Image (cartoon, helix red, strand yellow):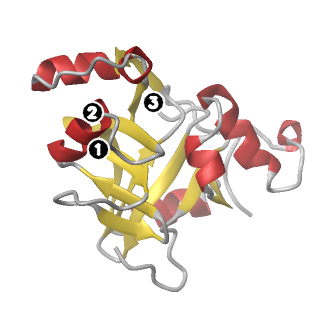
Amino acid sequence: MAEEQNSLVHRCLIATPAIKDPLFASSLIYMCEHSVDGSMGLVINHQTSQKLRDIFDQLEIHCDDEAINQQPVYLGGPVQLEQGFVLHSTTGDWQKSLEVSSGIYITSSIDVLQAIAENKGPEDYLVILGFSGWASGQLESELQQNSWLTSASSTELLFHQNSDDKWQMAFDTLGFDISKLSPVSGNA
């Protein structure tokens, strides 16, 4: 997943107050793919009611570490909710981890989950169900309508912040007050 100039890969989309859809309201989306063919990202701040234990149980993976079992599972978006992803740091000897950007990887391979259960997985990770996808030109149109703002991403933001704080933290990096944004989108 090589980054192209003007690409949104390894950046975050910040939902503006204009977005009323509950799936995307106050969402922060980490962009994994962005090209003329379309875009793919993962919401990284909306937790599901599931815990990692539930995923392990479904996949018949045994884990004795209760702290790992209680890790949250995120809702990455409304597309292919049955598809699981692990967004993680560090590479390992895993089957299908693709580098999104320097030090950030994505995989849908079960061997990473097995390694996590055995406490041999990546140091930082998010387990995510589903993804957010856009057809060719769709995301660009939404950006022009001011539905989304973009910000830099970091391992700190992705992996080391409370989910409830991520959206505000990303917004704060832009340097202006969110209360000054109009809830009505559009352009002149």
Label disc, if present, on residue 118 of the rendered structure = 2
- Earlier sequence position, callout 2 versus callout 1: 1
Q: Which of 90 and 64 is in front in this view?
A: 64
Up-down: is 56 above or below 159? above
Residue 80 in view in this figure: no
Residue at left offset 42%, top offset 46%: 42
- Earlier sequence position, callout 3 versus callout 2: 3
Query: Which label sits in the foreground, 1 or 3?
Result: 1
Q: Nearer the viewer, residue 58 or 47?
A: 58
| Quadrant hosting residue 168 | top right
Callout 2 secondary element? loop
| Quadrant hosting residue 77 | top left
Dot 1, crowdedness within 10 Å: few (<14), some or many (≥20)? many
Dot 3, crowdedness within 10 Å: few (<14), some or many (≥20)? some
Label disc, if present, on residue 85 of the rendered structure = 1
Q: Describe residue 117's horizontal placement relative to residue 132 as left or right.
A: left
Q: In which quarter of the image is the C terminus?
A: bottom right
Residue 145, given in percent of the width and then of the height, sits at 60, 56
| Quadrant hosting residue 40 | bottom left
Disc 1 marks a residue whose amino acid type is Phe
Residues at discs 1 and 3 in contact (Cβ within 8 Å) = no
Residues at discs 3 and 2 in contact (Cβ within 8 Å) = no
Residue at left offset 80%, top offset 54%: 173
Residues at discs 2 and 1 in contact (Cβ within 8 Å) = no
Label disc, if present, on residue 23 of the rendered structure = 3
Disc 3 marks a residue whose amino acid type is Leu
Q: Describe residue 25's horizontal placement relative to residue 176 as left or right.
A: left
Label disc, if present, on residue 170 of the rendered structure = none
